[in-house]
Structures are given as C-alpha cells and as structure tokens.
Image (cartoon, rainbow, N blue to C red):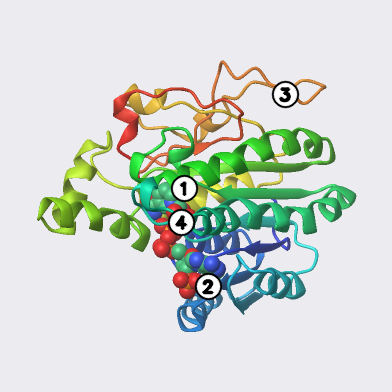
Amino acid sequence: MDLGIKGRRAIVCASSKGLGRACAMALANEGVHVTLTARGAEALKKTADEIRKAHPTVTVTEVAGDITTPAGREAALKACPDPDILINNAGGPPPGDFRNWTRDDWIKAIDANMLTPIELIKATVDGMMARKFGRIVNITSAAVKAPIEILGLSNGARAGLTGFIAGLSRKTVIANVTINGLLPGPFVTDRLTGTAKPEAEKRGITIDQVLAERAKLNPAGRFGDPEEFGYACAFLCGAKAGRFVQLVRRAKHVEDGREAKVEDIVENEDIDAHGNNDTKNDVLANTSLGRVSLESSEQLPTLNTQERFTC
Ligand code: NAP
C-alpha cells in the first residue's frame, strides 16, 4: 500500500533504537525524509546509516541531544523546522515504589513523557494546520489504559499527556492535522528487558525467565517486533488517515483470539461535525504480536486482568 506521504518530512524523536527506530525506518520506507534524535551519537549514526542504506532516496538527518531539554528540542526543530510528521518519543520513567519518589522524580517523568511532546506540538502544529497536513503520533504505553503498579511515574505522566491531547486533537483535525497516541504493549526492545530486571532480582530468577513467562501470557504467545509497531505508526501518518483522531481501543480483537488486520484499524466511528466521536466502537492497531492501541480519550476504563501483563 502506498501511504501517499512520499517526500514529506518527519521528526522522529528518540529513534536510535527500539520503537522510535522502527517508526523512522517505516516512514523512510514510504519515502519520508526523516530527522532522527537520540542522546547517544554513536547508536544514532549507526541507525541513520542503516536507514540511508535501506532507502537511498530519502534524506536522513541525525541530531544528537536530549529531547527532554529545551536545547535538544531546539536542535531537532532547527534541523527540521516545518515537519509534516512528528513522532513524539522518549525513554520511559523507571519502575519503583511511589514512596521512594521525590518531587524531582515526578518532574523528570512529566518533563520527558508529557511536557516534551506538548512543547514539540506547540512548535509545529500551527504550521501543519496552515499547510493543511500534519500527522502527530505520541508513543506512550498500554499503561495509559491498563496502569501497571510499578510504573506509576509512567502511568501518571502519560495519562496527563493523553488527557491534554484529547482536547487539542479535536481542534486540529479540521485542518487535516491528526494527533494520536500509540500505546505499545510489550515489544522486544531494551526497555522491555529493563522493566523485567527488578522482578528477576526480586524473585531470584533470570531476566530471560521473566520475559518467557510474560510472553506466554500474551494471546499471541510472544512479544511484539518493533518493526510491526513501525508499520502501525506509518499507517497513522498516511495521507488517507486524516480522520483518525480521538480514538479509543479495547482489546476485543485480541480477546476474540483472532489476528487483527488493517481492516480492524478502520473500524472506527465517524467523527461528527463537532469533532466528537462515539467511542462505543473502538479502533485497534494490533500488530499480531504485541498490542498497539490508539488512544487519546479522556476515559480510562477498567480493563480485565488479561490486559494487564503489558510493560
Ligand atoms: P528503547 O529500546 O530503550 O529505545 C529508546 C530510544 O530512545 C533510544 O534510541 C534512546 O537513545 C532514545 N532516548 C531515550 N531517552 C532519550 C532522550 N531523553 N532524548 C533523546 N532520545 C532518547 O525503548 P523502547 O522500547 O523503544 O521505548 C520507547 C518508549 O515506549 C519508551 O517511553 C517506553 O517506556 C515506551 N514503551 C515501550 C514498551 C516496550 O515494550 N518496548 C512498552 C510500553 C511503552 P539514547 O539512550 O541514546 O538517548
């Protein structure tokens, strides 16, 4: 499928590894020129070179820096001042017990996983609206809908972003600018391994054992491959995805035990003239391994236990 975004420009934050890298690769695959960011210059260059090699016709720009700082954001925006596509991403907050978290820990999590995306949206959304095209995807976490006890910093900061976006996205879609959240379930990345470590230490077993147990709980019997996440992201950035906004998804396709397909993604209800949609029928981008859901709702429904194994 040609997503109709060849020649568009994207900023893909935190993209030297993992989910961000996969999004950058999938967008480049569609002919999108990509600006990549990460703190570590070496891994960033490696990824940029891999994308250049795989997609020689696209321009790949690397910006080494911390996207959660004003300087990091400024550098990314200087390299790509008028992006058509913005993929917001940053490392996730550490797990832990809220009794040990200080105000600084909370501010750091909110800065990285709520205020940084908002700042980047603030810097780019008006230009997108003026040009009548924009696709913004916030990589958050399934924890937004199925909070995970040890990831309280993540639950809180990302839910805050989701609530904010729920309001803003209703105002931008009129100008063909969509803002959506992609809520990954478990995907095989460094982050996944990192979240398994405390449990492995607590139970005196290996990280691999923890991961194997968790993978078995997934209806697919395995974790997601970041490449699949990248495809879901590229789809949301497509020219024909101009009404994908403000969507809620539940895991019904997973619970049905069937593999979700692209048709599942378009099962959303129409947004009415006021930008509202009836969320009874939900939307799913399930990549058949890890779950990916689209979310920007103010609702945080209680989910069943089957849905709570994600990281
Ligand atoms: P990952 O494999 O650890 O990759 C993180 C990437 O982000 C790296 O390229 C890293 O490079 C970059 N990065 C981290 N902090 C940064 C910063 N402050 N500024 C610029 N770049 C930064 O992680 P991932 O699994 O792809 O996770 C991406 C996001 O999805 C995280 O917020 C994570 O919590 C969330 N998530 C992941 C999963 C999963 O199963 N993987 C599930 C739910 C949610 P540098 O370290 O060099 O900066």
Q: Distance between the residues labelled 4 and 1?
A: 7 Å
Q: Mark 1 points at which residue?
A: 154
Quick one: label 1, few (<14), some, or many (20+) residues within 10 Å? many
Q: What element carries label 1?
A: helix
Q: Name the residue under label 3.
A: 271
Q: Identify the image quadrant of residue 60.
A: bottom right
Q: Label 2 amino acid?
A: Ile
Q: Which of the two labelled residues, at mark 3 and mark 1, occupies the earlier sequence position?
A: 1
Q: Is mark 3 on a helix, strand or loop?
A: loop
Q: Respond yes or no on whether mark 1 lies under 8 Å from ligand 1.
A: yes
Q: Which of the two labelled residues, at mark 3 and mark 2, occupies the earlier sequence position?
A: 2
227 vs 280, left or right, is: left
Q: Can residue 123 be seen in this view?
A: yes
Q: Mark 4 points at which residue?
A: 92
Residue at 43 percent of width and 40 percent of height: 143
Q: What element carries label 2?
A: helix
Residue at 82 percent of width and 52 percent of height: 128
